[in-house]
Image (cartoon, grey):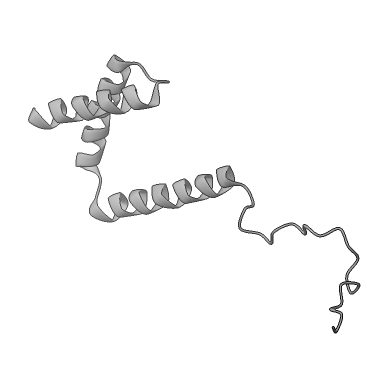
Amino acid sequence: MIGKVIGAFVGDRLAKQTGSIGGASGAALGVVATSVLRRMSLPAMVALGVGGYIVKKVIDKKQAGDDTTTPPHTSTAPAGTAKAKAA
């Protein structure tokens, strides 16, 4: 019983953060999630956690864009023409 109440509370908090799910829907989702987690085996829980972590990293990388690639060239001068003059 306490697990369902905690699940409903956490679901309600998550619903408030996302905005796309209402408060009552989030609470119901929290209750369902606690019931499902109670019936899952430990390896399944670990696999679910690792999979969620990987999906989050992939989505974050796509949202960041291709900032990790080489930077754009800023010089407009042709390559090899900027030689130092001896003074």
Q: Residue furthest bottom?
A: 86
Instruction: Give the left or right position of residue 29, taking residue 68 as reference.
Output: left
Q: Quadrant of the N terminus?
A: top left
Task: Give the total number of marks visible in the rendering.
Answer: 0
Q: Where is 32 relative to 70, above or below?
A: above
Q: For the point 26% across and 23% down, which residue is it?
A: 12
Image location of residue 29, percent across then percent down: 30, 25
Indicate the position of residue 28 as horizontal and vertical percent values.
27, 21
Q: Looking at the picture, does residue 62 appear above or below residue 29?
A: below
**Quarter location, residue 40:** top left
Q: Measured from the top left, where is residue 5 in percent x and y?
A: 13, 25
Query: Which residue ends up furthest to the front in the rendered image?
Result: 87
Of the pair 50 and 66, the residue shown nearer to us: 66
Q: Say left or right for 30 vs 22.
A: left
- In the displayed structure, 60 sits above or below 21; it is below
Instruction: Give 74 or 85, whichever is nearer the viewer.
Output: 85
Picture residue at 35% right of the left edge, 48% below the top: 48
The residue that appears at 85% across and 83% down in the rendered structure is: 87
Q: Is residue 57 above or below residue 39?
A: below
- Seen at 89% across and 74% down, the residue is 80
Specify the farthest residue to the left.
2
